[in-house]
Amino acid sequence: MISYSLPSRKRIKIVALILLCIGFVLPGKAQTGTQGIIPQPVKIKSDNITYVFSREFKIGLGPGISASNVTFFKDYIRLVRDIHKTTPFVNHKMAASNLWLQINPKRVSQPEGYTLEVKPHRITITGHDEAGVFYGLQSLVQLLDINKSEIAVKGYSITDYPRFAYRGMHLDVSRHFFDPQTIKKWIDLLALYKINTFHWHLTDDQGWRIEIKKYPLLQSVSAYRDETIIGHKKDSPHRFDGKRYGGYYTQDEVKDIVKYATQRHITVIPEIEMPGHALAALAAYPQLGCTGGPYKAATYWGIFDDVYCAGNDETFTFLQNVMDEVLPLFPSKYIHIGGDECPKTKWKACPKCQKRIKDEHLKDEKELQSYFIGRMEKYLNSKGRQIIGWDEILEGGLTPGATVMSWTGEEGGIAAAKQHHEAIMTPEKYVYLDYYQSLYPAEPLSGGGYTPLGKVYNYEPVTNELNGEEAKYIKGVQANAWSEYMASPAQAERQLFPRMLALAEVAWSPKQSKNYDGFLKRLRYHQPLLNLNINAAEVYDEITDSVAETADHQVALNLQTTLPGAKIFYTTDGTDPGVNAKEYGGPIIVASTGSIKAAVFMKDKQVGRVYEKSFTIHQAIGKTVTLKNQPQGGYNPGNTFGLVNGVFGSKLYNDGQWYGFSGDDLEAVVDLGSMQNVSKLGINILKYHWQKMWEPTLLTFEVSADGTNYTEVYRQTDFPDNGINAVRANIKIQQARYIRVKATNKGIIPPGEYIAGAKAWLMVDEIIVQ
Ligand code: ACM
Ligand code: ZN
């Protein structure tokens, strides 16, 4: 179903055989799936009739419908032809057609919309336009029953159209390069799930990936980096593989991919990043940087101080010349010009940039960024194009026609819409597919974060903060895939699928029809088909948990699976659970230190991997904690129980356990409720300078009987470990009721360090009292 560019008859046979066997070989899990369309249509009804495909199956194309729309459908039928002996022919007569395709904007008023009618004598798809017809075919493919001796489809009647005009998927090909065949394979999947925009992130610090004939060094120098970091950027010291890495798309390849996408009603938006993320270009043309270099394409991931010089006119000449070659390759109305993560360090010290600020009467470097974007916008407008930029383009004021792609949060999109600028919602917290999709430690290395399938699915792009008029400026939604930790297509696919299908439903289906359980049922049916040709993840039915406080301040572990009819079995003795272990029937009260292992079982067969959670039970569990400063952003669990819940934050810091203070100190007081013997105090501190997470300059523990007069019992200034620093202080046994923990934030990240000048994060979890 997925492979439309079919390599060989042999493969067709194999795939067809697998398809035919699906009903017999799948474990119980997939049988809980239900055939249905992803994304869920606006209206879908079925009746008892069945349309059976004849051996000579004729597809009729009404006026205005190009044959390219049916290519994939024919391929799909051909995929199963060896068994079903069905051959589709194309004609132009309704009466002689088994499947009639027509355009009728009067019958279907919504752009890209369609109706699909399956009657005993004929299937009819009516589109508002060609795209609508194409999407009707995508729906039909998903409804075909190919498990019997003949291909058949039930009598469906569908009315369908998209919620958002912009339904996007982004792909970074700078950090890792994916060949044109792979890109085309993924474009087929975008089309199948009715995503209509492919945002192609073509340039960045680690590699320039599009041929620009006027600047041959972009091909010979900028397209390559000397080596690549091994492991995660936060690991220290950094290690490298010593292997030159790179590649680029020739203009012919770009044209071919854009044509391929266009035939599938997908607009390709190129992103040529500026003024930041420019190292690869600067490596070839150092005169475009503030200091003149020398520069090298980056060999690790992050934000780099060296950006295009905004005071040098040659920078604009270069970028305009680049655009002169880019624009003819991409007919899209929008051109993405980046604008994110541009440090101002070099501009502050650059005489040319400072002269520009003076000459243009700009207030500061933020306005200089606005000037930069505005100058490029004018140029692109003069060529009939509109710009999109990441939300940092709001910083020094939005330029007149800019569309904002809101990624750091939803605020950028909201601000843009309120200013009556178009916005596309891509908040990292919900729709970054390079983030982890499971908290199981066995997950492959990812960027960070946690965006499981359900979180992507439940993302709502139009927030309540916008009134009806403003909401119209939210043009759509997009998922982003940054490829730092996607070194191969297989790794990328595991991140993209099936979460991209959830995004597709967010983008297409009516808000009121969204239902995660219903989506999962349809997904479980799609999953084996996805698995045929895609390395899709299948972790969404594994165990998720929450750790709660009981009424009497104990720790309770809740476990869930989304798999209907499944049971969870668990152990507390360290062994892997089987069906003879304890069956989970409600919150598990955790009264002693140890680890709980659990797994999902369907009809006595284990589904997915083994879950494990460790607890350290101590005297402060469930006690009242008072914080002087509140944790911030993504590191604010929203309560203080997490500091005394017996669960330690993990090294991936994406589990909601860590409390993060940006620039602020920690001052926490634990009230044990009564005078108690205390002999050991502890806290965990996370230190990753490469993630802006700094150890405190001073940590102290103090004890008190009355909450007013404290005695210091321990101090520490050295936190040597990159990662979790587990502070465990043995103190002289004494009586205390109150424990005060103070940790002094590093403050501003010092010069020479990663993101110098920014506020350091102080990251802490679990205050342990024993
Ligand atoms: C981004 O994720 N830097 C747009
Ligand atoms: Zn400069």
Image (cartoon, rainbow, N blue to C red):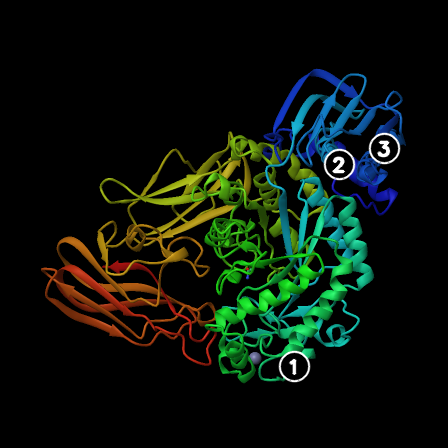
Instruction: Rate crowding at label 2 as few (under 14), some (14 to 19) or many (20 or more) other CA atoms within 10 Å.
Output: many
Mark 2 vs ligand 1: CB below 8 Å? no
Q: Quadrant of residue 607?
A: top right
Which amino acid is tagged 3? Arg
Q: Which residue is mark 1?
A: 286
Residue 93 in picture, x, y percent from top left: 89, 25
Say which element carries label 1.
Answer: helix
Q: Which residue is mark 3?
A: 81
Q: Which image quarter has ligand 1? A: bottom right
Q: Which residue is mark 2?
A: 134
Label 1 with label 2: CB-CB less than 8 Å:
no
Query: Which of label 3 and label 1 is nearer to you?
Result: 1
Which of disc 1 and disc 3 is earlier in sequence?
3
The answer to whether 740 appears left or right of 727 in the picture is: left
* Residue in front for this viewpoint, 638 or 707: 638
Query: Which of label 2 and label 3 is nearer to you?
Result: 2
Which amino acid is tagged 2? Phe
Residue 666 in picture, x, y percent from top left: 28, 64
- Whole-Å distance between the Cαs marked 3 and 1? 57 Å
Which of disc 2 and disc 1 is earlier in sequence?
2
Say which element carries label 2.
Answer: helix
Which of disc 3 and disc 2 is earlier in sequence?
3
Residue 459 seen in this snapshot: no
Mark 3 vs ligand 1: CB below 8 Å? no
Residue lying furthest top in this view?
A: 48
Identify whether 486 is placed above or below 497: below
Residue 170 in picture, x, y percent from top left: 63, 54
Residue 262 seen in this snapshot: yes
